[in-house]
Image (spheres, rainbow, N blue to C red):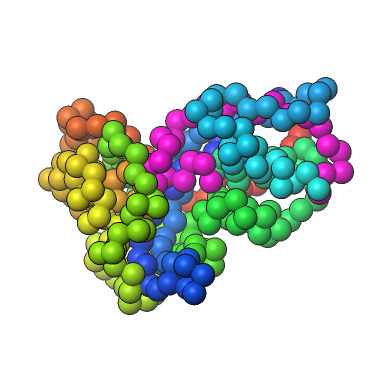
């Protein structure tokens, strides 16, 4: 039995800088890994089937964990059946990358269990077929992201704490992208500009999320009393950086929705994972 963490992420900002001919949007963002984690348990089985426990709300064929195993099958030198159990702590549809992180964790662990022999770069390339956020979790490092999120420049970020709120709603990424008022031409920028004035960097999806989902607007209004509230990714979660003058316990206790206190990570706890 192997039990490993699967960390979440925050998008410290998210800009759309253009649109490709194929309809995909060009983005710029910073991925910050955080210590809010799902836990995945891998058990090799006698039967050849892949089974997943703990995520019954998602059909097996659509489950990114299952898809990650299937994408590795052609590379397996010692294939075995697997029962994979998940302890879900990262809320779904939240913009925290839980599904992508689960897929990346599966790629890393099963690559070793099945002796596929693939490098991190090869796993990241396979992961991109599962989702644009999967490579960042495969690499397990904070990054400046461009393209559709696949062009990564690894960066060092200061250790910080964040308060994260999860409004009681599920945001449709497709709905946000379909809105005619979505800003799609933000001027491209550089990491050094972010370092100078991080609070000037927002999320192009935020105005739409606030207008289409009252729960998101309520959460942002609440956090704006204490700091600068931001939306992460295209999900429902909003966050603010913890400062010395905040009464963290009071903020968490009176939140209008589920609230988390999280720490930033320098790297994923899976970064140097080895099957013993």
Left or right, 227 with respect to 135, comes to: left
Relative to 207, residue 78 above or below: above
Relative to 154, residue 248 above or below: above
Q: Is residue 92 magenta?
A: yes
Q: Residue at x 35, y 66 (%)?
A: 15
**Residue range highlighted in magenta:** 75-100
Relative to 225, residue 90 above or below: above
Relative to 260, residue 205 above or below: below
Q: Position of residue 155 (x, y in %)?
A: 48, 63
Which quarter of the figure is the N terminus placed in?
top right
Choose top left, top right, bottom left or bottom right for residue 109.
top right
In front: 45, or 120? 45
Q: Tally the numbered discs.
A: 0
Q: Residue at x 73, y 56 (%)?
A: 119
Residue lying at the far left of the rendered structure: 225
Left or right, 245 with respect to 45, comes to: left
Q: Position of residue 76 (x, y in %)?
A: 82, 44
Q: Position of residue 213 (x, y in %)?
A: 24, 44
Q: Residue at x 53, y 46 (%)?
A: 100
Left or right, 111 with respect to 151, comes to: right
Residue 263 in sight: no
Q: Is residue 133 magenta?
A: no
Left or right, 155 with respect to 215, comes to: right
Q: Residue at x 81, y 28 (%)?
A: 48
Q: Position of residue 143 (x, y in %)?
A: 48, 61
């Amino acid at each position: 039995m192997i039990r490993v963490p699967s960390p979440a992420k925050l998008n410290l900002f998210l800009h759309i800088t253009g649109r490709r001919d194929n309809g995909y949007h060009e983005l710029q963002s910073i991925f910050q890994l955080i210590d809010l984690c799902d836990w995945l348990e891998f058990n090799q089985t006698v039967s050849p089937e892949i089974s997943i426990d703990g995520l019954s709300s998602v059909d097996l064929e659509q489950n990114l964990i299952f898809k990650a195993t299937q994408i590795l099958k052609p590379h397996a030198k010692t294939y075995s059946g697997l029962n994979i159990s998940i302890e879900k702590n990262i809320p779904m549809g939240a913009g925290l990358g839980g599904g992508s992180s689960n897929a990346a964790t599966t790629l890393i662990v099963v690559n070793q269990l099945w002796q596929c022999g693939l490098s991190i770069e090869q796993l990241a390339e396979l992961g991109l077929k599962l989702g644009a956020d999967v490579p960042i979790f495969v690499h397990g490092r904070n990054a400046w992201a461009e393209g559709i999120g696949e062009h990564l420049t690894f960066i060092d970020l200061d250790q910080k704490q964040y308060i994260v709120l999860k409004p009681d709603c599920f945001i449709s990424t497709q709905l946000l992208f379909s809105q005619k008022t979505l800003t799609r031409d933000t001027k491209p920028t550089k990491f050094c500009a972010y370092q100078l004035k991080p609070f000037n960097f927002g999320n192009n999806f935020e105005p739409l999320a606030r207008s289409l989902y009252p729960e998101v607007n309520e959460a942002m209004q609440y956090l704006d009393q204490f700091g600068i509230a931001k939306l992460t990714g295209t999900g429902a979660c909003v966050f603010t950086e913890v400062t010395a003058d905040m009464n963290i316990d009071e903020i968490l206790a009176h939140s209008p929705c589920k609230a988390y206190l999280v720490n930033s990570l320098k790297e994923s706890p899976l970064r140097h994972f080895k099957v013993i």
